[in-house]
Image: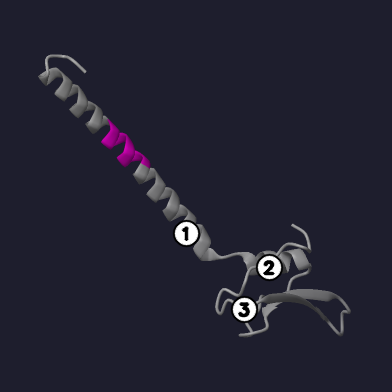
């Protein structure tokens, strides 16, 4: 991951996200965070821009949706195989009823 990775829109309002740096006054070290200019949502502070961007772009719902989509596609594949077998059996049965001709 690099600093040029595109930020996803705000998960709350859809607004444009930006990253910024905050310098710790006593320690003099920089921390980075991502925030939404529209609704004010923001990440925690991170030691690097890529870590802040990764935290912002991570969507818990996406993982769940991917899992559900995979399950749905598996069910669709099973249905397709079953339907194909039924149609093949029906075609075979119909050809046998006509005296074995296809």
**Residue designated by label 2:** 7
Residue 96 shows in this picture? yes
**Residue designated by label 1:** 64
- Is 14 situated left or right of 46 in this image? left
Residue 28: x %, y % from top left:
89, 79
- Is 97 situated left or right of 46 in this image? left
- Is 38 situated left or right of 100 in this image? right
Tell me the CA gap for discs 2 and 3: 11 Å
Residue drawn at point x = 17 percent, y = 20 percent: 95
**What colour scheme has been applied to the protein in the rendered image?**
one colour
Q: Are dots 2 and 3 in contact, CB under 8 Å?
A: no
Residue drawn at point x = 51 percent, y = 58 percent: 63
Q: Quadrant of the N terminus?
A: bottom right
- Which of these two is toward me, 7 or 23? 7
The image shows residue 48, relative to residue 13, as above or below, that is: above
**Residue designated by label 3:** 15
- SS at circle 3: loop
The image shows residue 95, relative to residue 33, as above or below, that is: above
Residue 37: x %, y % from top left:
68, 83
Local packing at callout 3 (Cα closer than 10 Å; few below 14, some 14-19, many 20+) is some
Residue drawn at point x = 68 percent, y = 68 percent: 7
In the image, residue 93 lies in the stretch drawn in magenta: no
What span is colored magenta in the figure?
Answer: 77-84
- Which of these two is toward me, 45 or 85? 85
Sequence-earlier tag: 3 or 1: 3
Sequence-earlier tag: 2 or 1: 2
Q: Quadrant of the C terminus?
A: top left
Mark nearer the viewer, 2 or 1:
2
Tell me the CA gap for discs 2 and 1: 20 Å
The image shows residue 50, relative to residue 82, as above or below, that is: below
Local packing at callout 2 (Cα closer than 10 Å; few below 14, some 14-19, many 20+) is some
């Amino acid at each position: 991951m690099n600093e040029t990775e595109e930020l996803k829109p705000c998960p709350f309002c859809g607004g444009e996200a930006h990253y910024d740096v905050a310098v710790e006054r006593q320690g003099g070290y920089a921390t980075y965070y991502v925030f939404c200019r529209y609704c004010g949502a923001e990440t925690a502070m991170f030691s690097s821009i890529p870590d802040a961007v990764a935290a912002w772009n991570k969507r818990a719902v996406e993982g769940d949706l991917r899992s559900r989509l995979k399950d749905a596609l598996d069910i669709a594949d099973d249905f397709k195989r079953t339907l194909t077998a039924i149609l093949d059996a029906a075609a075979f049965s119909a050809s046998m009823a006509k005296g074995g001709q296809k």
